[in-house]
């Protein structure tokens, strides 16, 4: 038999019992929809989680510290071996004033009008700034002695000594919050932290020293790299060491540093690099420790949701099998006639398999369209915005500033269709075998 | 179409035995059948119900496997063919006319008649043209696109005959072909079968319990209780043999 004839016959048979075919198809459709929607919710969850983590900080930065209670020192040799690891694109030693028991005050403006009672001050190898993924919101990388970078919100740490207490600071949270918890257009601080000269006053055991500094840029806040990117200042490590030695005497800073920051090229390499560094005898921390369990949880949820969807597709498979068995018992005589007229066993098997497969295929295709619609509606509702063309497009394929609940990637649709066809064929297998076993003799029985 | 020399047996049955095992006994439907049917012969297998005539037809057409013995058609041991071999053999060499007509209800007369050609893989246009020609020859030129339910019994059976002969089979098996028809139509149908068979020198195996059918046959094989009790040529058969 020609495939074209088998196909025509298959369509004819399906159309013959329209309502039965339609109901079976509906089962597959619902099954397919539930899988697609469930998985798309899972994907949406993972995506928004990832977005959230990315907002918190650089996911590919690892912080390396010596092990608690001594252990190996983080010296240049260690730094070199870390830099040579696969996937590492940058590494820098980092020191902070907290490591040296110094207190710090920052002054700005004429006659020290603005005072910051506390600030996080750190030094890194500024040559690695770009490799490490520090982002500048304004200004440039420090090149000269005395130049520093200010944290994104450094200017909000200052109080105005000419105003009475209680109203002498600019509250950057006063503008209210958006739904992600970020401040909504914060009010302008007293001065521009990216360019206003400041004075840093360090104190240890009553000894005070003042260092004039010239901010030359503004860092973007990044928790993975440290609080100095937010409410502090960052300078070259050698410069900070020099200041500390002036205060506490030479030799204090020569024992290696307490922290090394490592930047990895790709998120998938983070855990591998972390493992290698741990093997060198250091302790590490990164967003990976947050990301991993979150990812695991998301995957578990995704599997659970997908499993729920799969159950309904499985039920649909039973529906197909049932329909096929029914139709075969109705057509027993017909099959006998076909056989006695010389229809090959193979053709009968293909005929019944293709009937089941077509139900799966149609169910899958329509299911995909329906689930796209459902996903779109769910997303539109979650946006809360009045639906316009831009909104609808964003609900389907995503867009800047829209976080979708259901994300339906193309591969999901494709695999849903393939899966539905496979389910159809799989559930048609047993009935098709039954059909094949019907003897030609059935044609003669009256 | 003369694949086999005249007067040579086209169907040979050797020591055929068929038993049906029941729960506590075995029913022997065919005891020990030896039979050969010559090319171009119209052979009537005659018997009352329970005589084993239907079982014999099933055996001859390869619908069932024998308990012992073998059926050869054109030298091919069809009792030993597997399902696929049988299907291919049926496509090329066998035709069937059924008592209940057995047209597929969802197909038109033309499509029904074209079925055997479809199983062979003949393209649609070609096979339907042949089917229409065949239907015209059985006098159904006005029923080409009718469905079986829209036709009378006689018309359905004529379509059935067209279907049986369309692929020019060597042997056509007819199982009580007129069992559901009235006398006038019976004559019409039987004359049609005989004329087709004569034209293309095809062999017909006719199974019936109706003694009147014997008038159309060359040879009558009578079965009682699974045994051949008589096997004789009719006048018509003698005339054909002397030709």
Image: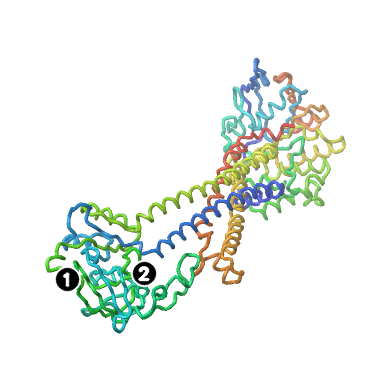
In the rendered structure, the answer to whether residue B106 lies left or right of residue A250 reads right
Q: Position of residue A121 (x, y in %)?
A: 27, 69
Alpha carbon separation for disc pair 2 and 1: 29 Å
Q: Nearer the viewer, mark 2 or mark 1?
A: 1
Seen at 35% across and 58% down, the residue is: A287
In the displayed orientation, state which residue is furthest to the left.
Answer: A250
| Dot 2 alpha-carbon crowd within 10 angstroms: few under 14, some 14 to 19, many 20 or more | many
Furthest-top residue in this view: B24
Under circle 2, the secondary element is loop
Give coordinates of residue A255: x percent, y percent.
15, 62
Outermost residue to the front: A164
Left or right, B151 with respect to B81, comes to right
Q: Chain of mark 1?
A: A
Please tell me if label 2 and label 1 are on a single chain: yes
Give the camera-side residue of A363 and A3: A363
**CA neighbours of label 1 inside 10 A, class few (<14), some (14 to 19), many (20+):** some
Please state the chain letter of the residue tagged with numbered disc 2 in the rendered image: A
Colouring rule applied to residues: rainbow
Task: Report the residue marked by disc 2.
Answer: A221
The x and y percentages for residue B217 are 77, 31
Q: In the rendered image, is residue B241 in sight? A: no
Residue drawn at 61 percent across, 50 percent down:
A30
Q: Which residue is mark 1?
A: A247
Q: Closer to the camera, A403 or B128? A: A403
Q: Does residue B174 appear left or right of residue A177 in this picture?
A: right
Of callouts 2 and 1, the N-terminal one: 2
Rendered position, A193 above or below A230: below
Q: Position of residue B193 (x, y in %)?
A: 77, 39
Image quadrant in which you'd find residue A239: bottom left
Is residue B231 shown above or below A375?
Answer: above
- Label disc, if present, on residue A204 of the rendered structure: none
Residue at image coords 50%, 58%: A44
């Amino acid at each position: 038999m020609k495939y074209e004839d088998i196909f025509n016959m298959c369509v004819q048979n399906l159309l013959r019992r329209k309502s039965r075919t339609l109901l079976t198809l509906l089962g597959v459709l619902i099954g397919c929809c539930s899988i697609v929607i469930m998985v798309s919710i899972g994907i949406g969850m993972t995506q928004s989680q990832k977005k959230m983590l990315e907002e918190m900080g650089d996911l590919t930065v690892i912080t390396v510290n010596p092990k608690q209670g001594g252990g190996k020192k983080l010296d240049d040799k260690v730094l070199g071996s870390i830099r040579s690891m696969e996937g590492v694109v940058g590494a820098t030693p980092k020191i902070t004033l907290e490591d040296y028991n110094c207190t710090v005050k920052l002054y700005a403006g004429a006659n020290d009008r603005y005072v910051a009672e506390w600030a996080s001050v750190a030094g890194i190898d500024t040559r690695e700034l770009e490799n490490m993924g520090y982002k500048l919101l304004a200004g440039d990388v420090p090149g000269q002695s005395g130049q520093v970078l200010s944290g994104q919100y450094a200017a909000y740490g200052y109080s105005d000594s000419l105003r009475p207490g209680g109203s002498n600071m600019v509250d950057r949270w006063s503008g209210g919050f958006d739904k992600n918890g970020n401040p909504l257009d914060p009010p302008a601080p007293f001065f521009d932290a990216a360019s206003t000269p400041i004075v840093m006053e360090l104190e240890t055991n009553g000894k005070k020293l003042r260092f004039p500094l010239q901010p030359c840029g503004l860092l973007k806040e990044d928790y993975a790299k440290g609080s100095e990117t937010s409410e502090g200042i960052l300078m070259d490590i050698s410069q900070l060491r020099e200041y500390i030695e002036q205060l506490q005497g030479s030799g204090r800073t020569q024992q290696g540093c307490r922290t090394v920051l490592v930047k990895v090229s790709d998120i998938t390499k983070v855990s591998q690099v972390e493992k290698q560094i741990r093997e060198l005898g250091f302790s590490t921390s990164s967003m990976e420790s947050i990301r991993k369990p979150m990812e695991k949880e998301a995957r578990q949820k995704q599997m659970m949701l997908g499993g729920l969807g799969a159950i309904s597709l499985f039920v649909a498979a039973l529906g197909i099998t049932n329909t096929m068995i029914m139709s075969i018992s109705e057509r027993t005589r017909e099959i006998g006639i076909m056989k006695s007229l010389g229809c090959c066993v193979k053709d009968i098997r293909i005929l019944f398999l293709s009937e089941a497969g077509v139900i799966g295929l149609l169910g899958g295709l329509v299911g995909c369209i329906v689930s796209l619609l459902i996903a779109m509606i769910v997303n539109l509702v979650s946006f809360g915005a009045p639906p316009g063309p831009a909104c609808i497009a964003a609900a389907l394929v995503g867009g800047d500033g829209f976080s979708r609940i259901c994300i339906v990637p193309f591969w999901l649709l494709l695999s849903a269709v393939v899966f539905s066809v496979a389910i159809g064929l799989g559930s048609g297998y047993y009935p098709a075998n039954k059909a094949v076993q019907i003897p030609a003799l059935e044609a003669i029985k009256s | 179409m003369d694949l086999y020399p005249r007067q040579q047996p086209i169907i040979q049955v050797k020591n055929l035995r068929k038993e049906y095992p029941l729960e506590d006994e075995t029913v022997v439907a065919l005891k020990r059948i030896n039979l050969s049917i010559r090319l171009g012969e119209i052979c009537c297998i005659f018997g009352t119900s329970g005589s084993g005539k239907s079982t014999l037809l099933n055996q001859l057409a390869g619908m069932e496997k024998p308990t012992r013995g073998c059926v050869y058609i054109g030298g091919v041991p069809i009792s030993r063919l597997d399902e696929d071999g049988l299907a291919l053999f049926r496509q090329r060499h066998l035709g069937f006319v059924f008592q209940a007509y057995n047209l597929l209800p969802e197909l038109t007369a033309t499509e029904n008649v074209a079925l055997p050609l479809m199983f062979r893989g003949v393209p649609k246009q070609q096979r339907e043209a042949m089917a229409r020609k065949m239907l015209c020859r059985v006098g159904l030129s006005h029923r080409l696109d009718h469905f079986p339910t829209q036709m009378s019994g006689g018309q359905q059976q004529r379509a059935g005959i067209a279907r049986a002969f369309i692929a020019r089979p060597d042997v056509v098996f007819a199982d009580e072909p007129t069992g559901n028809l009235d006398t006038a139509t019976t004559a019409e149908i039987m004359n049609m079968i005989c004329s087709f068979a004569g034209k293309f020198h095809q062999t017909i195996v006719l199974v019936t319990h109706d003694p009147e059918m014997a008038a159309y046959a060359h040879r009558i094989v009578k079965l009682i209780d699974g045994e051949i009790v008589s096997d004789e040529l009719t006048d018509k058969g003698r005339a054909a043999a002397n030709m």
